Amino acid sequence: MSKIHLICGAVGAGKTTYATKLCRIEPAMNFSIDQWMTGLFSPDLKGEIDYDWAMARIERMESLIWSQVVQLMELNVAAVLDLGLLQRKHRQKFYQLAHDKGYDICLHFVDVDQELRWQRVLKRNAEKGASYSMEVNRDMFDFCETLFESPSGDELDFTIIHKP
């Protein structure tokens, strides 16, 4: 049976880069929320991103992504979910969805020091390379820092910690 790989880490940790590499090793289909968000909604965005506006769209995208994951599992194809997953409650949603379907799941925690992550964000903003999807300013970075919850407790039973 194929596995669902959840990627979590704070902003700038390298989740997207890690997910891309994992897809080549596994092999697996990658679902990156940043790619979906920028592809579907960024062209229509006027001004700054409002948190509630973004979360409503993310929830709808995740529902569509999950329907694709279910099809992949039926085809015995692994899935990598690069959905941010900053908070335990958000991760638990996917743990429960997988459990209800009887799917194997693994959490990959990309753990990187805050200052290094900020430097990576600045570099990504400047270079606009493969993992770039949108400009992340210091206010957005700091806001996301207040949201992030490292995996803990029973989550660690099925977590691979990656410290690049």
Image (cartoon, rainbow, N blue to C red):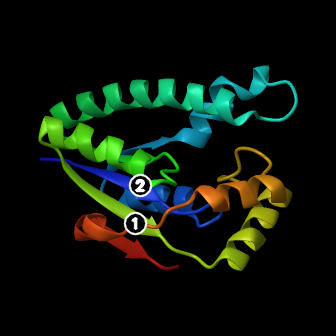
Q: Secondary structure at mark 2?
A: helix
Disc tally is: 2
Look at the picture and state if 160 lies above or below 99.
below
Amino acid type, residue under disc 1 in the picture:
Pro
**N-terminal-most mark, 1 or 2:** 2
The answer to whether residue 104 is left or right of residue 53 is left
Q: Secondary structure at mark 1?
A: loop
User: Which quarter of the figure has residue 75?
Assistant: top left
Tell me if I can see residue 77 in this picture.
Answer: no
Q: Residue at position x 49%, y 29% from top?
A: 59
Amino acid type, residue under disc 2 in the picture:
Arg
Q: Position of residue 152 (x, y in %)?
A: 36, 69
C-alpha span from label 1 to label 2: 7 Å
109 or 123: which is nearer to us? 109
68 or 45: which is nearer to us? 45
Look at the picture and state if 84 lies above or below 142.
above
The answer to whether residue 20 is left or right of residue 29 is right
The answer to whether residue 82 is left or right of residue 71 is right
Residue to which mark 2 is pinned: 88
Q: Position of residue 155 (x, y in %)?
A: 29, 64
Residue placed farthest to the top in the image?
A: 44
Q: Residues within 10 Å of mark 2 (few under 14, many from 20)?
A: some
Q: Are marks 1 and 2 in contact (CB under 8 Å)?
A: yes
Q: Residue at position x 27%, y 47% from top?
A: 95
24 or 143: which is nearer to us? 143
Q: Position of residue 103 (x, y in %)?
A: 16, 44
Q: Residue at position x 15%, y 35% from top?
A: 101
Q: Which mark is residue 112?
A: none
Residue to which mark 1 is pinned: 151
